[in-house]
Image: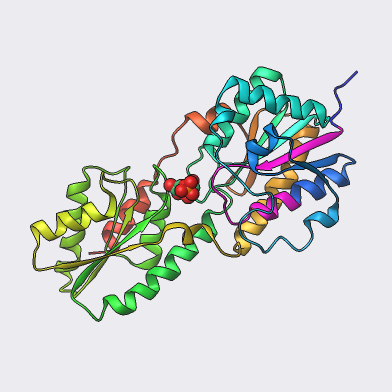
Amino acid sequence: MEYQIKTIGVLTSGGDAPGMNAAIRAVTRAAISNNIRVKAIYRGYKGLMEDEVKEFTTQDVSDIIHRGGTILKTARSEEFRTPEGRKRAYETLQKEQIDALIVIGGDGSFTGARLLAQEYNVPVIGLPGTIDNDLWGTDTTIGYDTALNTIVECVDKLRDTATSHERVFLVEVMGRDAGFLTLSAAIAAGAEAAIIPERTPVVEQIEAAIGHGRRKHKNSSIVLVQEHAIEGGVQRVAQLIEEVHPEYGTRVTILGHLQRGGSPSAYDRILASRLGCAAIQALLDEQRSVMIGLENDEIVYVPLSRAIQQKKAIKDDKWQALQVLSI
Ligand code: F6P
């Protein structure tokens, strides 16, 4: 007899991202409309290990599509990285009679999900939820578009004060080890340059950034700096600029966790809704250990192993566009 999924668990894990609530809503409603029960797991893998579980009805996900953050809360769990932690998690799945797990998160969350699937033969589906957009196999991730718009809005505001002074404004942008947010925000905000880890050497990027501003006889420049592009971060970039060009004053803005907040954009709400529905369909199609992605506006199933292990590349035309447009 075919293995039938009667109950799913859903959790959010890692850094929250705008649109996670829309994904929770879609997963819940798509499951219930297919006669599958939904058990919501709070605080990510921590809550899974500690049995913080509540059955959801369609009403539990009412009025959340427009909210940032995650109603399920989230966490980064060291214990779940250990075999003992995953054993505890599996015991909760058994106790709660959860047949399959949907994990909304980034690559750290998927690494844990994959191990749980391998060790205990649990069907697991991943939904890409991270502002970093650093998962291979999907054009974009839930939260990326909203974060990008937030960054651009902040840089637009900075421009007002920047044009009134002779300074280099350095803006630190999140992204863990990826520069997608930084590069795209630099293009959209019309910044002089982006300093990202994928393009080295960073010191040359800094020199070029200053050069761009000077060539334009501009009073001021705006440079976006990926948080981990260089050891010492954006403060180190400021120091390097002032050492070489003492005539420039630098000002540093760290956008920080502002970038993860706010109501999700329409794009992220639609993306999360589509991926959430597709996650339930994937389970019904007997897909296991896959991430649901979007490629050329089509839903794709990407093996979790590939989503985690393959490195998504920065589009060279975007990098070139920034160089050309900032001359
Ligand atoms: O992965 C999302 C992200 O916001 C990264 O861009 C950032 O490096 C990290 O999380 C920050 O994590 P935390 O909220 O745990 O400080």
Q: Position of residue 296 (x, y in %)?
A: 57, 47
- Left or right of 300 in this view: 325: left
Q: Quadrant of residue 1?
A: top right
Q: Residue at x 37, y 61 (%)?
A: 187
Give the position of the C terminus as an image quadrant. Answer: bottom left
**227 or 301: which is nearer to us?**
227
Is residue 286 something one can see in this rendering?
no
Q: Position of residue 20 (x, y in %)?
A: 64, 52
Q: Quadrant of residue 126?
A: top right
Q: Residue at x 9, y 68 (%)?
A: 247
Stretch of the chain drawn in magenta: 6-25
Q: Position of residue 62 (x, y in %)?
A: 79, 60
Q: In the image, is residue 11 part of the stretch drawn in magenta? A: yes
**144 or 285: which is nearer to us?**
144
Q: In the image, is residue 277 part of the stretch drawn in magenta? A: no
> Is residue 76 depicted above or below 193 in this figure?
above
